[in-house]
Amino acid sequence: MTERRPSSERRIEILEAALTIFVKKGYSEARMDDIVQEIGLSKGALYHHFQSKRDLFIALIEHWMDQFSPIERGGLMRAKPSREIILHIAKFTAKLFKRNPNWFLVEPEIWAFANRDKEIKEMASHLYGSVLNEFEALIKRGIKFGEFRDVNEGMIAMSIMTSLHGMIWFALFKPNDFSLEEYVDLNMELILDGIAVQD
Amino acid sequence: MTERRPSSERRIEILEAALTIFVKKGYSEARMDDIVQEIGLSKGALYHHFQSKRDLFIALIEHWMDQFSPIERGGLMRAKPSREIILHIAKFTAKLFKRNPNWFLVEPEIWAFANRDKEIKEMASHLYGSVLNEFEALIKRGIKFGEFRDVNEGMIAMSIMTSLHGMIWFALFKPNDFSLEEYVDLNMELILDGIAVQD
DNA sequence: ACTTACATACCGACTGGTCGGTATGTAATA
DNA sequence: TATTACATACCGACCAGTCGGTATGTAAGT
């Protein structure tokens, strides 16, 4: 018997194991037995904590969204120019990525699932919507205070987001001659300089 | 019995059906029977043309890479500035996408597969490598002729490619308030203006 | 021309392993 | 002693791949 642990702790442990396995094998190829083996637990125990494979995956997405919510924080740097805040978020994201690439590598898995599951599509849309909203607000604010030109803020927000998504491609095919930081910095500069008010 | 057709034609018909099914359901959830049903063929016939599911998928990738090779064409516009050629390629890609989104929506499926299959990873790397090379060459050429600043051409090539990959996100989550063309134009302009020589 | 021989395209019932999920029981905890 | 956390043995639907067979060309031999 494995050491007994309260459900709240064990659930997280399972979710982390599931993340590893889902990333390594993909949702469909991932076996419930693989996940269980990863932490030396039994299948019965897993099904005690989660109703089904799909349920586990949904819980994983929720857990995953929580990991990223600190991005939506703010407060501390309200006074600074939008440019700096956006740069900060980008650098922070890159740092997160370096620390735990798996959190990002599940994304294609989520996309694939979203493509055939309405509920999951809505969850993902909701998350991306809130990320886009955050960037949009920052850009609007930048325009208002004369920092940025009068651009289509929704579009720019999308550019920023898809640029950050480029990190996923980066992780999958590791072009060994470039650094991730360089990539993120360059992309952000291109966007932010591009929309800056010329002097 | 279905009408007999030469192998070369039938293979392509199967590949196109497979593309539809793989995109709709994902590789693992796609059933060989689904593919066969799509064109009213028998399972035996399918296995007459392809050795296995994986073999079919590999053939699909090869077919898919062929579809994109016209991008690597050129010739006709050798004289024009790099900026225009790159813009042309981007617009051309967007048009391709509009005409057949499935060709792009398989990409996440290929990525996912590449993550757990060495051979497929190498195929994908090879394709992306050649796309990157093409953009790199164009940028180098632009630098040489005083069109662009002395930037890291590899990095910029990556920016261009990941920007175009953003279309996939676009297709999956269809933000109905934006147009694809606008997105592509904006991104390309940000990059190309960003590296242009200032006057 | 027509038969023999071989090749290619196709059919669909069947199988055997796989894997998500369940049933039932036991040890710890509150 | 009731509940929670876990283990083990098992089930059965599902599906990639097989195989014996049919149907349609097609090319050489006579």
Image (cartoon, coloured by chain):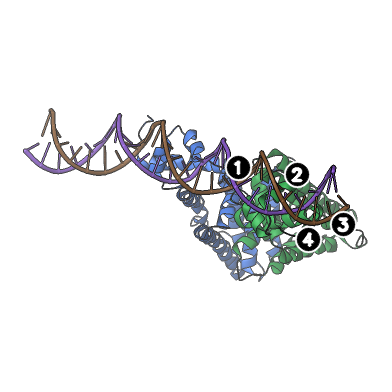
Chain colours: A green, B blue, C brown, D purple
- Residue B75: give x, y in percent of width and height: 48, 57
Q: Which amino acid does label 1 sit on?
A: Lys
Mark 1 element type: helix
User: Quadrant of the image for the N terminus of chain B?
Assistant: top left
* Tag 3 and tag 2 share a subunit: yes
Q: Mark 2 points at which residue?
A: A123
Label 4 to label 1: alpha-carbon separation: 29 Å
Q: Is residue B179 at least partly visible in the picture?
A: no
Q: Is residue B54 left or right of residue A199?
A: left
Q: Name the residue under label 1.
A: B98
- Residue B17: give x, y in percent of width and height: 49, 39
Label 3 to label 2: alpha-carbon separation: 20 Å
Label 3 to label 4: alpha-carbon separation: 21 Å
Relative vertical location of residue B117 with respect to residue B60 in this rendering, above or below: below
Label 3 to label 1: alpha-carbon separation: 37 Å
User: Quadrant of the image for the C terminus of chain B?
Assistant: bottom right
Q: Name the residue under label 3.
A: A73
Is disc 2 surrounded by few (<14), some (14 to 19) or many (20+) residues within 10 Å? some
**Label 3: chain?**
A
**Number of numbered tags placed on the structure image:** 4
Please tell me in which quadrant of the rendered image residue A96 appears.
Answer: bottom right
Q: Is residue A75 at least partly visible in the picture?
A: yes
Compare marks 2 and 4 and give the one earlier in the sequence. Answer: 2
User: Which of the two residues, A29 or A125, is positioned nearer the viewer here?
Assistant: A29
Callouts 3 and 4 close, C-beta under 8 Å: no
* Tag 1 and tag 2 share a subunit: no
- Which dot, 2 or 4, sits closer to the camera? 2
- Which dot, 3 or 2, sits closer to the camera? 2
Is disc 4 surrounded by few (<14), some (14 to 19) or many (20+) residues within 10 Å? many
Q: Name the residue under label 4.
A: A192
